[in-house]
Each structure stands twice: as C-alpha cells, then as structure tokens.
Amino acid sequence: MGVREVGYFDNIGGGQITVENGFAYIGHMKAPDGTSIVDVRDPKNPKLAATVQIPAHIHSHKVRVGNGLMLVNHEIMSDTIDPNACSGGGLGIYDNTNPFQPKLIHEWEAPGKGVHRFDFDGRYFYGSATQAGYHGTIVMILDLIDPAKPREVGRWHMPGQWLAGGEKPTWGAIDDHRCHHPLRFGDRLFTSYWHGGFVILDISDMSNPKYISGLNWSPPFACPTHSAVLVPFPLHGRRVMLVADEDVAKIGSGPPAFLWLVDITDETRPIPFSSFQLDHLGDKEAPPMTGCHQTVEKIASTEVPVAWFANGLRIVDISKPHAPKEVAHYLPDVPQGSRRVSSNDVFVDDRGLIYLLDRVRGLHILERVKD
C-alpha cells in the first residue's frame, strides 16, 4: 500500500494541525497569522472558513478543539522582545460552536513567555507554560469548565526549575530541562522534557501530579525529546509508547533524530528496546530538520504516521515492535519560499485521511491506497 494526495490547501506554514467534524485547524508559525480554520468536509476542495490574527510579538503555532472550544497558544518570541517587558503570553480561548466565526472568550496570561504546547480533552488543559519563580516551562493543568475563568488545578516541575524556591539545576545549560509537551492518556501525563528526556506523571489527583518514572538519553544522544505517545493497545503482550526526538537544538554532534519504542509494561522502569531511522540517513551528520519531528498523537493501528521534517511523511509499522519498519511514505514537492520540505505535523481524522502540514507552506490531505 502507498500514499496518494486527495487534496491540497495553500496556507502559510504551520506548527500544528487538528481536525474535528470536517474542519481543520492550523496553528501558524509567524505573526500576524495565528490560526486558520479550513472546511475539509470535501477533502478534494478545502476552503478557508475563518482566520484569527495575532500581534507581531506573539507566536501562536498550536491549536486544539473540543466541546465547542478552540484553544491556541500565545508565546512571546524572546528573540524579538523581552518577555518580562510585555504581556500577552498564555492561552487564547475561543467559542468555536460556529467554526466560521470563532469568538474570543478569554485570554489567560502566563507570566513570562507563555504557553508552548498543550493537550486538551474538552475540559482540562495540560500544557507547558512559564510561571513566576520557575526557569523554563513547567507542567500546568487548568480547568476550563468556565472558559471565561480558567482555574489552575495543578502543576509539576522537574526538580531544579523552581529557582524562587531555592532549587538549582543539576544539568548543563539552564534551558536544557523544560517541559515541552504533556499528553494525557487516562490518569497519566506522558510528558516530554526536551533535553531532560520524558517523565510519566500520575494525575489521578490533578491537584497533586506525582512522578512515576522518567528517562533521559540526551546526552549521549544529541537531539531533544519532542513527544511521548502511548500505544493504546498491547504489542506482543507489552505496553509500549513511542518517543520522538526532534531534529533541532542538538547539544553535540550526532545523527539526525529518530524514533524510539519504549516498553512501559512496568511503568516505574521504562526500557527503550528498539528504534527506527530512515535507511538513507543512518548515522550521517545532516543539517537540522532533516530527521524526525513527531508521530501522530492518537495512534489507531500498528501503522503510525510520522512527520519527518525534510523527509516528509513516513508510515512506520510497529506490529513487530522489536523490528519497526517503514511501509509507505510521501514526500511533497518543495513548497514555495523554501529550499526543502519541512513536514512539521501530522493528523489522522475519523475518515482515515492523513493531514500533513508543512512548516513553511501548505497542507497536504492524503490517504493510504493499495499499490
């Protein structure tokens, strides 16, 4: 089976794509473009439904929807402005009952840079956010039962981040260990922590998240950890998660980022037991954004779509978890304004359609087909 293109939407580059009820939501990389809502009920003819604009100093590249709400991140870009000298970082909360007319309900502010990535289940926000007294982003949980008045439920940080509490980092560069992306599965948060690896948190009591375990392989591996995604069904009787390293911000020389399979049957002792890399990349040095970025975040089968930056979409078969292999791929044409492909995110909707979003330009709507 291969992959073929069903439709294409010519949008400004994006960081995240999510699809619900026939509408695709795109978080863009650069202001003033914040969020685009695209009608994909006819995937062959996607049409723009609405846009949300943002101020020049804000980064709003992530978007989630659920329960009639649309959430977007607001992150102050420190390379253009001092995050301590202005406001605006945090979370934008919109009424999305009519995707053609999203209406702002509230802007929740996070002291410092704001929110980077987050998960949302229709009521609770689980995100990486800055807070006063902490260095870097930490895990934040908000209750949005009243979206006009978000309420903090709980928080967690890696020991060493709470500078105001007298903690001191035990790692090298102070920015190395920071919350990147919490993902909720049941009463657990599988949370990537950049060059701090990943942690598994027990949130059965959301007011008091508890550390269960964690694992960090950076160093010796050079790339930071982007996301940790639970496989929601057993593989050969084992409980497994996929951990994607991101091919940016290397702490030293090394091959492009790749994908890990980690056995968490005993979640107190996560054990990496296999990995996957593109054959033609191997152990060769390569420019940033050549290797892995992230897997699809909701795994529905043993064929897992992965956004692989300059190498487009790769579909990895994990049915034999000790020997993952590629079974299909799709490499888009180089988009206008770019020197190469930059596949940044991938989503699969309830029709089985695959949405591949480029960081510079374009959304490709794809489907698996028989050869």
Image: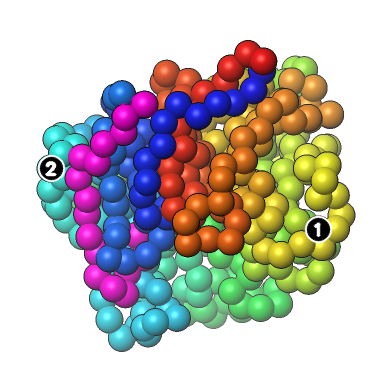
Residue 354 in the magenta stretch? The answer is no
Left or right: residue 232 versus residue 45 is right
Q: Which of 291 and 213 is in front in this view?
A: 291
Residue drawn at 29 percent across, 24 percent down: 41
Residue tagged 1? 255
Q: Nearer the viewer, residue 4 or 100?
A: 4
Residue tagged 2? 101
Residue drawn at 59 percent across, 26 percent down: 3
Crowding near the residue tagged with mark 2, few <14, some 14–19, many ≥20 C-alpha atoms within 10 Å: some
Magenta segment range?
43-60
Residue 370 in picture, x, y percent from top left: 63, 13
Q: Nearer the viewer, residue 289 or 190?
A: 289
Q: Is residue 113 above or below residue 27?
A: below
Quarter where residue 260 is shown: top right
**Can the viewer see residue 44?**
yes
Name which residue type carries label 1. Answer: Pro
Quarter where residue 350 is shown: top left
Name which residue type carries label 2. Answer: Gln
Separation (CA) of disc 2 from disc 1? 45 Å
Q: Earlier in the sequence, mark 2 or mark 1?
A: 2
Left or right: residue 239 versus residue 49 is right
Which secondary structure lies at badge 1? loop
